[in-house]
Image (spheres, grey):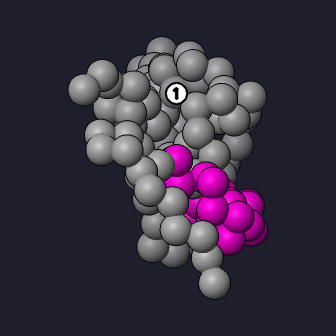
Amino acid sequence: MGEVRKVPKGKYVFPGSNPALRSAVTIMLPVMILYGLYVQIHGDYSPGGGFQGGVIVASALVLYHMVFGEAQISRVVSASFPRVMSATGFLLYVATGAISMIAGKSFLSYFFAMFDAVSEQKLGIFVVELGVGLTVCGSMVSIYFDFASREK
């Protein structure tokens, strides 16, 4: 069967040492990210949207960190990535509203002056949902990294 290892008291066993877990996560990760993007993009047509898509993508990154460790995830994303992602999402959200206000409309009325009213609204909702998704994903990953890096 399997080898039983004694773990010294107070030590942490790295979960990534299990090859079955590493293989399962390697297969699941792209599916989780694609599903998160699907939920994000189709949020205005079906249930879902920025928040749900952002949480799904963030959970994929958290799972990757939990299984493969700090050294491996630092190759994929930098330490500042979650904060940059959150800031970019916030700026997208605010810029969408600011464009409307500059044109003399109300905040988030989705005015882009290039398209008809229906296309403007669809584009505006998509950009706002993208901003929400980026902000939520960045915030969730940032919170997790802050907790994971805490000393005992």
Q: Which one is in front, 55 or 16?
A: 16
Q: Mark 1 Cα within 10 Å, few/some/many (few <14, many 20+)?
A: many
Q: Is residue 22 above or below residue 3?
A: above
Height in image: 25 above or below 67?
below
Q: Position of residue 22 (x, y in %)?
A: 68, 61
Residue position marked by numbered label 1 in the rendering = 82
Residue at left 63%, top 84%? 1
Q: Where is residue 45 in the image (x, y as percent from the top left)?
A: 55, 71
- Residue 75 is left or right of residue 79, and the answer is right
Using the rendered view, name the quadrant where residue 97 is placed: top left
Q: What residue lies at 68% left-to-right and 71% top-to-bottom? A: 20
What range is drawn magenta here?
A: 14-40
Q: Does the magenta stretch include residue 39?
A: yes
**Vertical position of residue 78 compared to residue 125: above or below:** above
The picture places residue 95, in percent across and down from the top left corner, at 51, 22
Q: In this view of the protein, can residue 24 be seen by the observer?
A: no
The answer to whether residue 53 is magenta is: no
Give the side of residue 145 with respect to residue 28, left or right.
left
Q: Majority secondary structure of the magenta segment? A: helix
**Between 150 and 110, the one nearer to me in the picture:** 150
As shown in the figure, which amino acid type bears the numbered disc 1? Pro
